Image (spheres, helix red, strand yellow):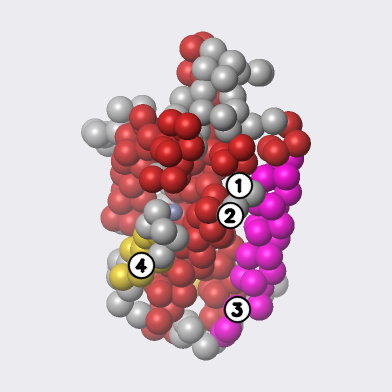
Amino acid sequence: MKFAGYPASGALVARALAAVAFAFAALAAQAQSQSRTDCDCADANDLFSRYCAARGAVGEWDRLIRQVRSEESKQGKVISALSTKDDLALCVDEVISVIRHDKGNVPARTARGSTDRNCNVTVDAPTACLRGVIEYHESWHKKMCDAHNQPDAPWRDTSNPFSYLGALINRMSTQSAIDYMYEERTGYMLEVQYTRNRLEELAGRCKSDAFVPAPSGRSFTLRRCPRPDMRDFERKCTRP
Ligand SMILES: [Zn+2]
């Protein structure tokens, strides 16, 4: 579908997508080779809880992406990130919280991070292992933020001075809701890969509620992630 007023030409979009694909491939490679010293047996529960929450978050972003796409089709226009970002983020936060507190999960410590409009990353984490998880997620946002601020970024080509000024002040002002959601979904996908890799490293040698005996083959496997039915919960999310 083609939307009126969409500023970037096909070539610019292709170039931007190529840059994103490259950044993603580089991060995925980094996930494989990450230092093995950040996480140890005492971190297994934190990693498992984070792994399950990140998987839940990816599923919720998928649901929201489908919903916003269908709204865009009906309205025939792009929905901006700025207008709906907080609402969408609330839906995902609710899913994460429900999974964290599910009785099928394990007790775990919390950590958070953010990347500001100048691409500076802040991490609040109680352990080196969780710090690694959060830094990994935020390093993706930092890459996207740095790409936005490059001299040849697509938004600088627009002839609309208001869009240009808006983008100088805040990346969200030119970002579509779909782009915003895909960026977050990718951040959580990277978290899933990262935590899964760390857990694989620990599985053979750590005793933890995160691991259960495997029926055959390898001696241990990951516990099943909780999959709560969100319809059982009263939601503040306005897009249930
Ligand atoms: Zn994020």
Label 2 – label 4 distance at C-alpha = 21 Å
Does label 2 or label 4 sit earlier along the sequence?
A: 4
Mark 2 neighbour density, 10 Å: few (under 14) some (14–19) many (20 or more): few
Q: Quadrant of the N terminus?
A: top right
Residue indicated by mark 1: 153
What label does residue 150 carry, if any?
2
| Residue at the disc numbered 3 | 34
Residue 166 is marked as none
Looking at the rendered image, the disc whose residue lies closer to the viewer, 3 or 4, is 4
Which stretch appears magenta? 14-36
Type of amino acid at the residue the image marks with label 3: Gln
Residue 30 found in image quarter: bottom right
Residue type at mark 1: give it: Ala
> Where does the C terminus fall, quadrant-wise?
top left
Cβ atoms at labels 1 and 2 below 8 Å apart = yes
Q: Is mark 4 within 8 Å of ligand 1?
A: no
Identified by mark 4, the residue type is: Thr
Label 4: which secondary element: strand
What residue sits 31% from the left and 70% below the top? 124
Is residue 234 placed above or below 22 in the rendered structure?
Answer: above
From mark 1 to mark 4, how far is it between C-alphas? Answer: 24 Å
What residue appears at the point 56 percent right and 67 percent down from the top-left corner? 194
x, y percent for residue 196:
56, 67
Q: Earlier in the sequence, mark 1 or mark 4?
A: 4
